[in-house]
Amino acid sequence: MSPLSLLALFLPSLSNAYAQDFSIPPGWQNTTSSASRTERLNAAWGAANAVQSAINASYGIPLDKPLYETGSNMVIAFAYQDYRNGNAFRQNQVVDNTLRLYERGNTELVDTTSAYNIIYYGLAEMAAYLAYKDDGRLVLAKRNFDMVYSNVITASAAASGTYSRVFTTPCGPSLGGLIFNPQNNTELVVLSVTIGLWVALSARLAEVVPENATYLATAEQSIQFMQTHIINTNLPSALVSDQFDVVHCNPFSDATPMAYDIGPYIEGLSIVANITKNDTYAQMLYNLVPSTVAVPEWHDNNGVLTEDSAYSKGTVIRGLLEARLRNPTNSNMTALIDAYITIQYNAVTKNAHIAETSNYKSSWLGDGSTDYTTEGNLAALDVLNAAVAITPTSEAATNSTPSAASSIPLSSSSSSSSLSFSTSASPSSLATLSPSSPASSSPPSQHTSIPIGGIIGGTIGGAVMFTVLALGVCLCLRRRRRTRERFGPSAVAYTPDPFIARMPNGPPPEKGGTRQHAASSHRPYNDNMASEPTHSLENTAEDTSLLGSMRSTVGDVDAQQALERSMILERRLDNLIHTLANQGETESSPPEAPVVQAV
């Protein structure tokens, strides 16, 4: 039975009137902002810089309050800032430090007993893949998917009642899409946030690897489970359940739902609705968005998000932004999400911002400590990044480069190694699928472009001009040769091979220490330089022997030296002309443009 068939059996009506209302609640305040795109980008840049400056390179994260999800949330925020602004400014920190340490098993980042943690870092790898076009990141995201997949109840397993855990349940086929934690076959804990993250990771993979149908099928199966057992759009206060009791087939009533229970799920559902073009999934999303922004337990009366669990608020912002960017034609939903994000932006910049710094409090109402916290800055960063992304089109067309004061070089605590990278912001294969492709703005330029055409033209032009000059010299020398042939036609045979410098056996004696040492000449290394000599050692020995013979037969020392110098010059020029002729053949086609790698 397909996931959509199961939905038809288990879902409540999708025509809920409340959920279809995209009108902005009348109690919301500060739903507009006059901040320019540049102002927003500068604020987002500063918040990210503050986090990066606090990173301990040995751990890949700041250590003020380390949690397993600190690194994954930080990577996602950094990578999507680069992705949507068309640059790779934080690639070294993301790829070469934090993710590399995660992949090596850093104990502050890795928890292989938690499906939640494994999936979260899978999403972090996907964000890095999208931002930096690094295929290695995609491979690792697939690896994390595979690590969890064996703990997912598939549709066939649910239909047959064969599970990897020992339990009985009245759920029947609707249990498909549920996820257990790995490495403990007796544990039956089911967390809603884990399933929401799983939907997001599966959907991301389904979008970039469409040839593997498992990713999309898995995402759809878990959507079915969420919609059947976890989501209830009829009542905002009970919108989502935090945990699920698999034995009794119902949510735990005493588990308080958090914003992170719904944020990743909205992200994944938005992607699935977008890539399948399925109206049923779109309708689920349209029901879910208005309910999410109105959960009274998570907001104050003005609409400010107050659910302050660690790394919770940012997930809601990311999920709503994904829904907004993937549904640009739904103007009513776009207006609602824009108003919601703007409320949070105003609260973050006016209430949570710590004066004279780029730091932010965890509470967006302004209470709490004024000390830096990674949680506070990353939550603010998600809002600031979203505020940049929803800037009106007219603003986006203006200069959006953050000011020099708000941007810093890569943190000295990050890895010193660097990789070549492309500043293109999204894989070309996603161009028609992902409306969240980056805006036209870019951060401070780190590298200047190289005029390849000028280099090629100058090289060819210089070679041609040098060839013409050499040919002219050749004509003059031919006339001299004819004159010299009257004195001895065999003299040319005694010419030494050109470019063989006769080095003295030792340095000349220095007098009074006044002689300056000649500076050594260094030729830059070129991979394309010939490794073989231009002439054989046998020819060199033969020419030297002939030169010695010539010296023994010539009596006039001055005449001998003059003739020797003349013949050496002629032979050198002949060799040069021959070399240039060969070079002309190889340069008949323009050289390939060099591959420019950023460092």
Image (cartoon, rainbow, N blue to C red):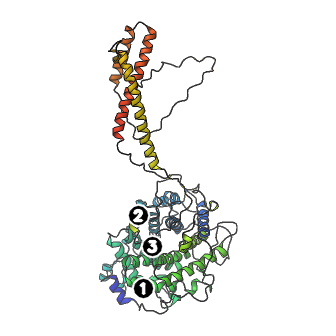
Q: For the residue marked with disc 3, what is the amino acid?
A: Pro
The reply to whether residue 232 is visible in this rendering is: yes
Residue 584 placed where, x, y %? 36, 38
Question: Which residue lies at the image location 40% right of the left edge and 77% below the top edge?
Answer: 274
Residue 416 placed where, x, y %? 53, 52
- How many numbered circles are shown? 3
Q: Earlier in the sequence, mark 3 or mark 2?
A: 2
Q: Which mark is residue 138?
A: 2
Q: For the residue marked with disc 2, what is the amino acid?
A: Leu
Which residue bears the numbered disc 1?
Answer: 283
Q: Nearer the viewer, residue 308 or 470?
A: 470
Give the Cα distance between marks 3 and 2.
20 Å
Q: In this rendering, which labeled residue sits more in front, label 2 or label 1? A: 1
Q: The magenta stretch spans which residues?
A: 17-25
Q: In this rendering, which labeled residue sits more in front, label 1 or label 3? A: 3
Kind of element beneath mark 2: helix
Q: Earlier in the sequence, mark 1 or mark 3?
A: 1
Give the Cα distance between marks 2 and 1.
30 Å
Question: Which residue lies at the image location 35% right of the left edge and 34% below the top edge?
Answer: 581
Which residue bears the numbered disc 3?
Answer: 435
